[in-house]
Image (cartoon, helix red, strand yellow):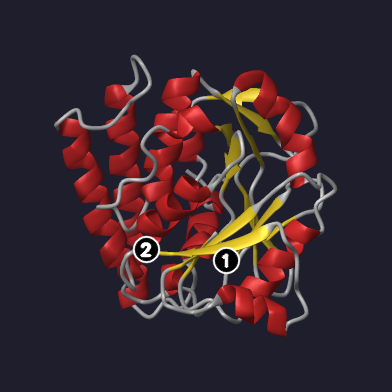
Amino acid sequence: MAAYKAAETTPAAVRSVLAQTHVDWELIIASDCGTDYLALCHAKGIRDGRIRMVATPSIGAGPSAARNAALATAQGDYLAILDSDDIWLPKKLSALLPLAMESGLACDNTCAVRPDGTVVTTAHPVGDTPQVIDALAMMNSGVPHFPLLRRELAGPGYRADLRFAEDVVFNMEAIARAGGMTLLPQCLTHYIQRPDSASNHPDAWRRADAAYGQILELLQLDELTVPAGQHADIVAAIAAKRALNQAYGAAVAAGGGMSFQDFAAQRNQQPD
C-alpha cells in the first residue's frame, strides 16, 4: 500500500485487509510523505503484527517508488496492491489466490464507486465464471485492475520514472510474462472516486497526458515488455487512452466538474 497524505483514508483501507477471510497475509504500508502510518493505525485502535511500514527514499518519490519499496520488503510468494483510498471486499484474497496459484496472475472485477457507495461503472460485465483476458482487455476497460500475482511475474517492479498509468504498464508487463490474466468477474475491489483525490485534481489530466506520451515513447524504443504479437495494438490502445484523457481535459476546462470515471462512463453510454 503506497500512502501519500492519506491519513483520512488509510485506516478504512487497512481495516478492509483485516476483514479478509484469508488470514495468511502481510500488509506493508509504504509512506511517501513522512507520516508514521503505524502510529496512525494504533491511534485508531488498529494493531496487528501482520502490518508493517517502510518509507520511500525521499518524500514525494511517487507511487512507483513507494510500491517498489513495499515489494522489496514483502516476504510472500504472491503480491497484491491496495491503494490507500480504496477498499477490498472480505473475499478478495480467498477468491483470487486459487486462481493465481493456477495461472500465476488473477484479478477481480474492479468496481468504481462514489464515497456514498453509488456504483459508477465496473471494469467488466459482472459474472461468476473465470475467464482469461489479455493486456488489451485490461487496458480498454477504462478502470484500473488490481491483480494478485506470483512474485516472479512482477519483474523489476514499477517504473520509477512513471507517476501516472504506472499500474497499466506494470499489469501489461505481468500479463506478457504470464501469457494472460485470469479474471474473476466479481466486484471484490472498490475503486473509490473521491472528489479531492489526486486523480480528480483539475490538472490531473495534464499529468496523465504527459505520462501517456512517455509510455508511447517507451513503446517506440522497445523498452517495455509487451505481449507477443500485440505491440501495434498496445500502441493504439495507449493512444486511445490519451485521446480520451485529452477529451476529459477539454471537458474540465469547459467547466465540467466530474471525475474521469464519470466522464468515461457517460461517453460509453452515448450511442455511436
Q: Residue at x 35, y 47 (%)?
A: 241
Relative to residue 93, is residue 200 depicted above or below? below
**Callout 2 secondary element:** helix
Q: Callout 1 environment at 10 Å: few (<14), some (14 to 19), or many (20+)?
A: many
Q: Residue at x 68, y 74 (%)?
A: 11
Relative to residue 256, is residue 81 depicted above or below? above
Question: Which residue was labeled with disc 2?
Answer: 248
Mark 2 to mark 1: distance in Å? 25 Å
Residue 186 drawn at (x, y percent): 75, 41
Q: Is residue 147 visible?
A: no
Q: Callout 2 environment at 10 Å: few (<14), some (14 to 19), or many (20+)?
A: many
Q: Quadrant of residue 170?
A: top left
Q: Residue at x 49, y 74 (%)?
A: 197
Residue 14 drawn at (x, y percent): 69, 65
Quadrant of image for the N terminus: bottom right
Numbered-mark total: 2
Question: Which residue was labeled with disc 1?
Answer: 84
Nearer to the camera, 133 or 163: 163
**Callout 1 secondary element:** loop
Toward the front, the furthest residue is 49
The amino acid beneath tag 1 is Ser
Q: Is residue 244 visible?
A: yes
Relative to residue 146, is residue 2 depicted above or below? below
The amino acid beneath tag 2 is Tyr
Nearer to the camera, 32 or 227: 32
Going from N to C along the chain, the mark reached first, 2 or 1, is 1
Relative to residue 134, is residue 141 depicted above or below? below
